[in-house]
Image: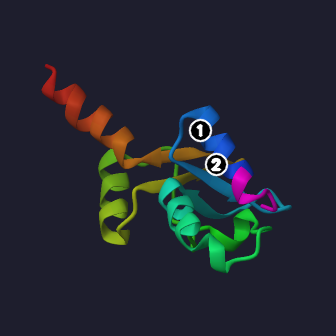
Amino acid sequence: MTDSVEMLGKVMRKAGVQCLPIIDNAAQCIGVVSAIDLIQLHAIQASLRGDVQAWEICTEPVVEIGPYQSLTEAAELMVSNKLHHLVVTGTEGLLGIVSSMDILEKKVLRQGAR
């Protein structure tokens, strides 16, 4: 939650991902920071102080989906909320993130390959 914006960028590049969940001290996901968030921040960086932390730029509220919900339900949530990422949570807490690209790959491209 208190990682710097620079750290978020490094983690995204190293992991090859387009967004990261932002987790508070209670292990709860409080938001998501996407590559677009970082690009927008860099565009206005000159007017901000240099010590911006992850929680200050994350998208909230978090839109969550359960691990056993269908890809169709995930797509519907993304469209209705105009999002490209959903946080997957279960009784154990944060399990992962599903992206619009994941849905395209699994639902559209694999079905088209048949």
Q: Which quarter shows the N terminus? A: bottom right
Q: CA distance from mark 2 to mark 1?
A: 6 Å
Q: How is the image coloured?
A: rainbow
Q: Judge from the rendering whether residue 28 lies leftward or rightward of residue 14; answer left or right.
A: right
Q: Residue furthest top?
A: 114
Q: What amino acid type is highlighted by mark number 2?
A: Gly
Say which element carries label 1. Answer: helix
Q: Tag count in the figure? A: 2
In magenta, the rendered stretch is 1-6
Task: Looking at this view, name the residue that lies furthest to the bottom.
Answer: 47
For residue 19, side relative to residue 106 (left or right)? right
Q: Residues within 10 Å of mark 1 (few under 14, many from 20)?
A: few
The image position of residue 87, as x and y in percent, is: 55, 54
The front one of 60 and 53 is 53
Q: Disc 2, disc 1: CB below 8 Å?
A: yes
The answer to whether any part of residue 91 appears in the image is no
Mark 1 sits on what residue?
A: 13
